[in-house]
Image: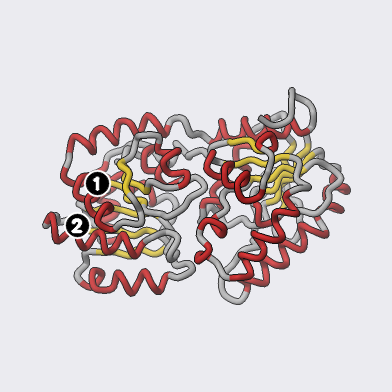
Amino acid sequence: MKVGYSATIWDGGRSGVGTYIAEQISALRCRDDVELRAIEFGGRVLAPSELPKTSGTDAGTHRRLRPLRDVLWHRTRLAALAASERFDLVHVPTIRRLPGRQPCPVVVTVHDLAPLRLPSKYGPARQVYYRRVLPRWLQAVDAIVTPSRSTKDDLEHFYGVEPRRITVVPNGVNHDLYHPDDPERSARVLQRQYGIRPPYLVYVSRLEHPAKNHVRLIEAFRRFKEQSGAPHQLVLVGERWNGHESIERAAAPLVETKEVVLTGHVPSADVPHFLRAADALIFPSLYEGFGMPIVEAMASGTPVACSRASSLTEVADGCALLFDPTRVEDMADALVRITGDIPLRHTLREEGTRRARAFTWRRCVEETIGVWRRVLGRDGPRGR
């Protein structure tokens, strides 16, 4: 089958959706049963081995203009491209770029409905878009893929989407990049390149307030230090995003004492080192459609403590220490437990590594192609 794959919000893997697009394109290009034609921002169809060079999401003055232009392109121009390229099917890997009527079936990946679960995450324009516009546009889509049952449930709850139109296809993890290895070697890399040395706890997430819940984590860490006297640092790995100023203000006193470290964006090749050398990944996000960092940490052999919220409980599946992300004292208790209980860390490390094996991009792509085949009537009933 010849598939047009919208890669217009390509970001080189700097976000969860960006990683999803990059990994899916890489895995799909290894298939001999799919002719994949990726489309970059502006409508150029890429050569089979080519990666996008531009993106429909950006910072600064383009933060609003490029997304708006990209949305309009999907609504008005994608159909002509799909017809001229004679695509059998179009896949759009984000709900934010729902296309207009197409000459072929359309499958969309909906990663989450964060603006509806966390109204404070975005401004009023995004609220109107998600509440008034997207529900109507989503009706024209032939099938929907979600990375978790949590997002599937949200689509049914908020938009009334029929369950048969939704297929849960979990995301994968790059096991070539994220795998157990010598933590001492990783510690040496971090000390040489970032001046960081164990013991520390790590949170891998862009600095986004309030959705990623950094401010509560910082307060919980302060309480943890007071209660335990432990020598740990808290390392926050991620680039600045919406509301980062609130996080930086909250962290400032502990940054000054070097108890909290803000790394900014780090290359993806360095992230496994931050995970392997850490005592644990702490993931206090208020809402996630999947939560890739917890699976990446598990695959790296790192114990995980995460929120008892949205998809995280589902993805962790009993292999992480859970806490209430809205209660600072509960989070502080989790920090005390995961740093002080060596048998617990060993158990979480073993169970997490086993759990991570279930998540591969090959499986993700196989099941996504299964959705495409059902939509095209080539493999049994549509949906599940």
Q: Quadrant of the C terminus?
A: top right
| Mark 2 lies on residue | 224
- Estimate the spatial distance between the alpha carbons at disc 2 and disc 1, rounded to whole Å: 14 Å
**Residue at point 29%, 36% (across, down):** 348
Q: Is residue 164 above or below residue 91?
A: above
Is 109 on the left-hand or right-hand side of 35? left
Mark 1, secondary structure of its residue: loop
The location of residue 352, given as percent across then percent down, is: 35, 34
Instruction: Name which residue lies at 64% across and 71% down.
Output: 64
Q: Which mark is residue 222?
A: none
- Is there any visible trace of residue 21 in the rendered image? no
Which of the 4 image quadrants contains residue 131? bottom right
Residue at image x 24%, y 56%? Answer: 329
Name the secondary structure under disc 2: helix
Q: Is residue 10 left or right of residue 256?
A: right
Residue reaching furthest to the top: 380
Task: Pick whichever, 352 or 324, lies toward us.
Answer: 324
Instruction: Using the rendered image of the protein, determine whether residue 15 is visible from the camera's viewpoint.
Output: yes
**Crowding at mark 1 (Cα within 10 Å: few <14, some 14-19, many 20+):** many
- Label 2: how many residues lie within 10 Å, few (<14), some (14-19) or many (20+)? many
Q: Is residue 35 above or below residue 289?
A: above
**Residue beneath disc 1:** 279
Q: Position of residue 246 (x, y in %)?
A: 38, 72
205 vs 100, nearest the viewer: 100
The label nearer to you, 2 versus 1, is: 2
- Residue 346 screen position, x and y as percent: 23, 34
User: Is 154 placed left or right of 347 in the picture?
Assistant: right
Q: Which one is in front, 88 or 290?
A: 290
Q: Amino acid at mark 2?
A: Phe
Residue 292 shown left or right of residue 255 in the figure: right
Residue at 34% across, 35% down: 319
Q: Residue furthest left?
A: 229
